[in-house]
Structure formats: C-alpha cells, structure tokens
C-alpha cells in the first residue's frame, strides 16, 4: 500500500500507563528500504508534514529492505511451513517480522485531552530507492496493527 | 584512519578470493550468499526468542577486522559516532567523504559492487545520498535505548536506529544486498557493536542469550557464546585516549 490509515478509530486506553507501543505484524522487508512515519489523529499527514508532536507524529519504524529478489525464480518465495518435523533449517530470510514502536509521548498527549476518547493511526512511508528508476509505490505491507499499553 | 584506509585498499584489490572486500561484503546479502540476521520477532532472526542481530554482526565485524589486518596489521575498524554533535552538524565523517587523501583517491568513499547473473541492475559502485545531518539520531535517543534493561527491547530498538542510519546514508547503504560494499558500513556497525558493549557493561546481570550460547552464527565458525565478551575476542572500545610526548 502507498500509505495506511486505520479503518476505524481506536479507543484510547484509560491512563495511567507508563508505556504505549504500536506493534506492526508481518511487516514485509523484501523490497525497498523505507521509514514508516506514524501519525495519530492526522489522516491528512503526508511526506511533507514535519514529523513533530504537534502534527500528531508519534514515531517511526525503519525497514531495511532487501530490494527485491536477486536469485533465481522462487528464491524469495517464503515457504508457508517447514517441510517436515526434521527440517531444522532456520526460517526463510524474508519471513515477515514484527516491528514495535513506542508511542508513549504522543498517546499520553492525546489521553490528556478530555475531549479526545479515540484516535486513528496513519502510516506514511518515506521510501529510499537504490536506483533512480526504482518503483517507490506500494512499499508498505503489514497484516495487523496492535496497541499495547503498560500500567504503572 | 590511515591504516584502516590502507587495509580497505588492500582488500579491494583482491577480487577473486575470500580475502577480498567484495567477498566480505557479499556475505551480508545475496544471493548466492545471504546470511545476515535482521529483524526482531517471528522470523529467522530470532532463535528461541532471542534476537540474533547483535551477535551475528559482532561475529561478522570481528572476522572482517581480521581480514582487514591481513592487509594492514595495524588497522582497526573505527566507529562512526552518528549521534555525536559533530555528526549532527557535519554529516558524514570527513575521512569517509573527502574524495582524495594525500593526492590519492580515497578508498573509503566508494567501492565496486559485485555484479553478475541476476545482479545486473545493481550499481557498479557504491554511492550515497545522505539526508541533512540534523536527521541523524540525537544522543538522547541513543541514551534512551541504552537505558532499556531488557535485552530484546534494547536489541530491537537499537536495530531500528541502525536501520535509520542505513536510510540516512541512502544509496547503496540503504539496501541489504549492497550495504556492506560501502566502507562506512563497517564503521556504522562498529558503532552499533560499541553500543551493545556499553549496554552489556551496564547490565552485567543480564542472562539474555545464555539459552542460545551454542547457536552457530552461520556462515561463521563462531557461536553466540563465542562473541558475548569482546575482551575474549581481543578488543574493546576506548572512551578516551590521551597521549603525552616524551622528551628524549
């Protein structure tokens, strides 16, 4: 996807919490490297908006990508399971992974506003092409987003 | 830096065997080689819940430095303190950025990238596209991560900063298969390794990675346990140096 906007608002957990994390599940890292800028309650955010707390910026994650497949056909296909119980090889290098970004400051700020009870999440990717003609669209792929807060 | 430069230049001249710069760089991302451990959870980079990003890169750095010293015995891999005030003011270190040193082409600026079947689209040489220096992570961000006392937390968040530096340098440093061809890759990872060393000194009671001590760090003939203590590998990171001339 070219960007992510949460499809429905997320309720703000009751404070106090000493830490809040956003977890991005099964992040693809097979393509271009990119920074994923996270904004709360700012669906208008784009690459031009400065990453500052005032604009809803909550933090970034960084995907160090593999820039596509350099092997023969099938080299970068991630198998869905091990061959059998005796297959002791480690998982495929391009197995999608989970990334966690601490957003405590931004979420605490929202929680402190009595008129705000829920929030949206927007992720704006800033791709880093290796070649001038690299396709920088559609770099952002993950399957699920979780919010975790930790009580005092 | 002169010895490091000489070591890199010596390695760069070797293009057909395992002593060469391209051999070591190609280990980071393939194919045919594709060994590095990046990422944190749910994937290959984790073994029994422990992220292997830091131990794998320590083994890689240690063996690379030995190959470097085969060419120039006095060479050491320097660390690039990308969170220092100087870095956030000036960007890339001059030693890696100035095109010529003493009238000679500086080998730390750019190196050839190994190409071949399936790799024809790769650039012929490393190149950079650094972002403005102010976008480098500030020291307070590094300190925040160093204060995390859970190893997995520390490793995953340090890996994120590390990824940001790859992106900040840009160009060939921003892609796994080409990053290690750029000589600054080694100084970057030396900084990452140094931060892990500092974390280890601050958290001597940590039992992180103990359960995976015997895990081999392929393709190297070293295990996780072999690289936990840098003094066992014969090096450490000096925080200060002072020299005094002696009258003769």
Image: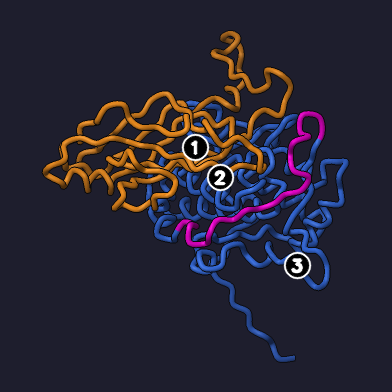
Chain colours: A orange, B blue
Tag nearer the camera, 1 or 3:
3
Return the x and y of residue B51 as percentages of the image width and height. Answer: 50, 35
Disc 1 secondary structure class: loop
Q: Are marks 1 and 3 on the same chain?
A: yes
In the image, residue B211 above or below residue B162: above
Q: Which residues are magenta?
A: B116-137
In the image, residue A78 above or below residue B153: above
User: Does A143 appear in magenta?
Assistant: no
Between B241 and A146, the one nearer to me in the picture:
A146
- Chain letter for mark 1, please: B
Between A48 and B222, the one nearer to me in the picture:
A48
- Alpha carbons under labels 1 and 2: distance apart: 9 Å
User: Does B135 appear in magenta?
Assistant: yes
Give the numbered dot on residue B209. 1
Tag nearer the camera, 3 or 2:
3
Residue A33 appears left or right of B184: left
- Helix, strand or loop: magenta stretch: loop
Between B194 and B224, the one nearer to me in the picture:
B194
- Which circle's residue, 1 or 3, is located before the other in the chain? 3
Return the x and y of residue B243 as percentages of the image width and height. Answer: 63, 79
- Chain letter for mark 2, please: B
Disc 3 secondary structure class: helix
Q: Are marks 1 and 2 in contact (CB under 8 Å)?
A: yes
Q: Are marks 1 and 2 on the same chain?
A: yes
Return the x and y of residue A87 as percentages of the image width and height. Answer: 61, 13
- Alpha carbons under labels 1 and 3: distance apart: 36 Å
Residue placed under numbered mark 3 in the picture: B2
Residue placed under numbered mark 2 in the picture: B228
Q: Are marks 1 and 3 in contact (CB under 8 Å)?
A: no
- Which circle's residue, 3 or 2, is located before the other in the chain? 3
Rendered residue at 47%/39% (across/down): A125
């Amino acid at each position: 996807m070219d960007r992510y906007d949460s499809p429905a608002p997320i309720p703000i957990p009751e404070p106090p919490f000493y830490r809040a994390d956003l977890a991005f599940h099964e992040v693809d890292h097979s393509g271009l490297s990119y920074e994923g800028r996270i904004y709360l309650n700012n669906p208008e955010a784009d690459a031009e908006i400065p990453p500052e707390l005032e604009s809803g910026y909550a933090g970034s994650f960084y995907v160090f990508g593999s820039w596509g497949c350099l092997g023969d056909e099938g080299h970068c296909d991630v198998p869905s399971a091990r061959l059998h119980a005796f297959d002791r090889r480690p998982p495929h290098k391009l197995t999608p992974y989970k990334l966690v970004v601490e957003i405590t400051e931004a979420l605490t700020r929202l929680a402190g506003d009595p008129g705000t009870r829920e929030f949206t999440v927007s992720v704006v990717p800033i791709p880093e092409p290796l070649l001038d003609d690299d396709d920088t669209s559609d770099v952002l792929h993950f399957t699920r987003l979780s919010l975790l807060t930790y009580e005092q | 830096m002169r010895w490091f430069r000489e070591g890199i230049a010596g390695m760069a001249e070797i293009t057909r065997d395992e002593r060469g710069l391209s051999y070591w760089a190609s280990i980071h991302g393939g194919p045919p080689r594709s060994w590095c451990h990046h990422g944190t959870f749910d994937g290959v980079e984790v073994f029994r819940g422990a992220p292997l990003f830091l131990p794998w890169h320590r083994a890689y750095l240690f063996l690379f430095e030995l190959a470097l010293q085969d060419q120039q015995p006095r060479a050491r891999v320097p660390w690039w303190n990308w969170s220092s005030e100087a870095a956030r003011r000036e960007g890339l270190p001059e030693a890696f950025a100035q095109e010529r040193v003493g009238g000679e082409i500086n080998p730390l600026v750019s190196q050839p990238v190994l190409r071949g079947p399936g790799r024809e689209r790769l650039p012929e040489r490393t190149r950079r596209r650094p972002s403005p220096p102010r976008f480098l992570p500030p020291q307070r961000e590094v300190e925040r991560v160093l204060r995390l006392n859970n190893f997995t937390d520390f490793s995953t968040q340090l890996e994120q900063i590390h990824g940001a530096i790859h992106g900040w340098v840009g160009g060939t440093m921003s892609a796994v298969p080409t990053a290690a061809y750029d000589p600054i890759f080694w100084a970057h990872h030396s900084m990452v390794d140094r931060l892990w060393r500092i974390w280890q000194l601050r958290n001597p009671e940590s039992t992180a990675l103990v359960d995976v001590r015997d895990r081999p760090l392929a393709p190297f003939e070293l295990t996780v346990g072999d690289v936990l203590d840098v003094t066992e590998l014969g090096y450490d990171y000096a925080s200060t140096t002072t020299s005094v001339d002696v009258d003769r």
